[in-house]
Amino acid sequence: MLPLTATEAAVRPAKRINRGRLKYYAWGYLFVSPWILGVSIFTAYPLIYAAYLSFTKYDLLTSPKLIGFRNFSTMIQDDVFYTALGNTAYYTFVAVPAQLVLALFLAILLNQKMPLINVFRTAFYLPTVTPTVASVVLFMYLYNPDFGVFNQIVGWFGFERIKWLDDPAWSKPSLIIMSLWTVGGQMVIFLAGLQSVPQVLVEAASIDGAGPISRLRHVTLPMITPVIFFNLVLGIIGSFQVFTVAFIATGGGPIESTLFYVLWMYQHAFLNLKMGYAAAIGWVLLAIILLFTLIQFAVARSWVYYEGGES
């Protein structure tokens, strides 16, 4: 056997290294292949296909027919589009701040050292894991204008009975109050953030004479601004997609006062069988959510504090 030349001796280890890397990458892709297949089949493909359908006329019974931007132009000229968008914006800008404040308040209370604190934490979190349909049905009984508990409480203070879900002026506030029932998830995240605040800073502020309110305002809240920002972003995204509570409780009424954007999209897709138009509605919603998210990330630089000094 002839001895290897200098070039062949240098190439052989490189080939071994390349084969080792290929084997390493192959095992890596093999392990993540279920996730890749799941995202490709259940997320990427539907997203791309919905983008295609938004430029077509499709009723589930016949093949999609390309119509260009007609779905989008029809949407802009539709008054119901602005009604649904306005209802959703009202819900978002009222419900999300209320949810954040209540969740933070509960987290501060449940961050105290007291007996049975874990029992209280579990009790306040349980509504989050309750099926949404069950919660909505429960609140429909509570909101009943004849024998509902809420009207009984209102009567104690001498006020007239409120029709709640049957009154256009009260329908959206009623659903917003209903959404406060499930702030347990945000509460747990706030609680985790509160427990990560360095006690050294809190004790130093206490030694300097800061009271509980001052410590909360100048130490605790600035330290948990990343958590507040996280809950804010997810809260706005979720509120723009509100559907189940309106679908079960009001069906979009009365007088379209709870016709939220996703409910309107559902009606076009599965009641009117206008899948192409519904796809266009969905893509407009995606653009709106993306715009609001980018704005939040841009504004966050001025008020979100990270321990590393960067926002």
Image: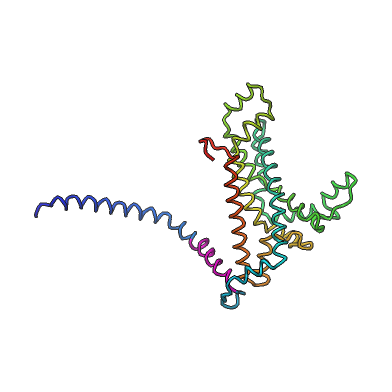
Please report the bounds of the magenta region as a residue range: 40-56
48 inside magenta stretch: yes
Question: Image check: 113 left or right of 40?
Answer: right
**Quarter of the rendering containing residue 119:** top right
Residue 91, percent from left and from top:
71, 53
Q: Is residue 247 visible?
A: no
Residue sitting at x 78%, y 56%: 171
Quadrant for the C terminus, please.
Answer: top right
Which of the two residues, 69 or 164, is positioned nearer the viewer here?
69
Residue sitting at x 67%, y 51%: 130
Residue 34, percent from left and from top:
45, 58
Which of the two residues, 284 or 273, is positioned nearer the viewer here?
284
Which of the two residues, 163 or 124, is positioned nearer the viewer here?
163
Residue 226, percent from left and from top:
58, 40
Magenta: main secondary structure: helix
Height in image: 103 above or below 63?
A: above
Colouring mode (rainbow / by chain / secondary structure / one colour): rainbow
Residue 307, percent from left and from top:
53, 35
277 inside magenta stretch: no
Question: Image check: 267 left or right of 5?
Answer: right
Quadrant for the N terminus, please.
Answer: bottom left
**Quarter of the rendering containing residue 252:** bottom right
Question: Image check: 16 left or right of 147?
Answer: left
Residue sitting at x 55%, y 66%: 51
Residue sitting at x 66%, y 67%: 75
Height in image: 187 above or below 174?
A: above
Q: Specify the farthest residue to the bottom.
A: 62
Q: Specify the farthest residue to the right.
A: 158
